[in-house]
Amino acid sequence: MRAVRMTHWGGPPVLTEVARPTPRADEVLIRVEAAGVCRSDLHVLDARPGALPYRTPFTLGHEVAGRVAELGPGATGPAVGERVAVYGPWGCGLCSRCAAGAENYCDRRADLDAVRTGTGVGLGRDGGMADFLLVPSGRLLVPVGDLPSAQAAPLSDAGLTAYHAVSGIRPALPLDGSGGGGGGGGGGASVAVIGVGGLGHLAVQILRATTSARVLAVDVREEALALADACGAHFGTLLRPDTAEVLRRQAGGIGVDAVLDFVGSHSSLELAVGALRAGGELAVVGSGGGELTVRKPGGLPPGVRISLPFWGTRPELEEVVALARKGVVRVETEEFALSSAPEAIDRLRSGQTRGRTVLVP
Ligand code: NAD
Ligand code: ZN
Ligand code: ZN
């Protein structure tokens, strides 16, 4: 079968032939129908040798949906023929976090990293940019019903990670108008979304669907702001030297209640800190390599809470799939054949993508 592989640190990805795996024990073989391309794939391809606890080669693709093709003799969960999204952070499956469906925060992550078994599907383990994907257990599959696979695949990372990040800031969003939101529309609280790409455009929709917050979008590309607008953002602006001030003004002059930073660079973190209200919430989702100094007293707003959400839980994936099946969340996709994966990955790198790039076999 075909597979898009990470063969050496520094890339580029290689489209090659590998043997089709056979499911043993609890394993399940998925016929891949769609695999999303994430900016994290670029971070993996660009990583220095030794920077990530993965062994090469492995197949890329950590956003996957398809149909159950074959069950190992001990496999449980969805039956052959059922359509599923793959829950991507693969933990030990045994600790209390994994038992609660939060394999993204598996207590044995350090042990798994030490033996370099990978963070999950397509991240050190063979992923879904291939004709077939071997999944260790049926517990990692979420049925998607009649949701098209090109929609379901991005929900398993872009959708799930955005949903988990929104869940984390929700306690900071007052519903009663006592928040910092001004300028009318969308209740009291204001949330800034920095970076309206694959994850960010879904975060805007999830915020609109599950909170009454006023959503303020920031990007460096006009097309991304147009997408934010189409996704329901109340306001959008290009990143400029005065953007923090603009966001504060949009938020009643006192600052935004929360920032979801889908970039994580020096400039985006600086913007986040400049726009936040005292006691606000900053979720750093992007892996852009920026740094913040935590010091008291220091440059951060008093009472600010900072979180580093990673992916999401299995129950949250079920929730975001349910939102998509209701039509409340829709992934904006650009589809490419699996054989065009190297070009599709280059397109993401050069910043030409609208929404999420999805590979279809
Ligand atoms: P993407 O390329 O689709 O979107 C990024 C967006 O940010 C683009 O629209 C881009 O124009 C915009 N942007 C770039 N620099 C900016 C700046 N300084 N200010 C404002 N906007 C800016 O990427 P994606 O696939 O959505 O991933 C976003 C980030 O999240 C990546 O760093 C990725 O590695 C990371 N990620 C983290 C997790 C996690 O679990 N924490 C999961 C998936 C992805
Ligand atoms: Zn990702
Ligand atoms: Zn675990």
Image (spheres, rainbow, N blue to C red):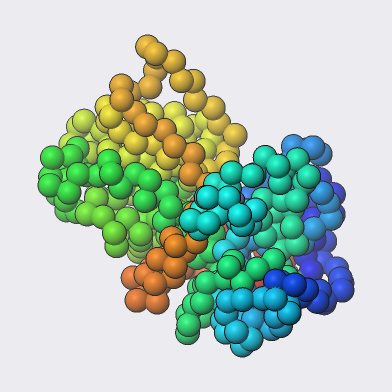
Q: Is residue 302 above or below residue 24?
A: above
Between 213 and 32, the residue placed more toward the observer is: 32
Residue 42, position as x, y percentages in the image = 68, 50
Q: Residue at x 37, y 40 (%)?
A: 259
Between 105 and 171, the residue placed more toward the observer is: 105
Q: Residue at x 28, y 44 (%)?
A: 171
Q: Quadrant of the N terminus?
A: bottom right
- Residue 172: image quadrant is top left
Residue 139, position as x, y percentages in the image = 58, 68
Left or right of 348 in this view: 198? left
Please indicate, yes or no, whether residue 137 appears anywhere in the rendered image: yes
Q: Residue at x 31, y 25 (%)?
A: 303
Left or right of 180 in this view: 146? right
Residue 99, position as x, y percentages in the image = 53, 56
Kindly give the residue lying farthest to the top in the view shown.
Answer: 297
Q: Is residue 204 above or below residue 50?
A: below
Kindly give the residue lying farthest to the bottom in the view shown.
Answer: 81
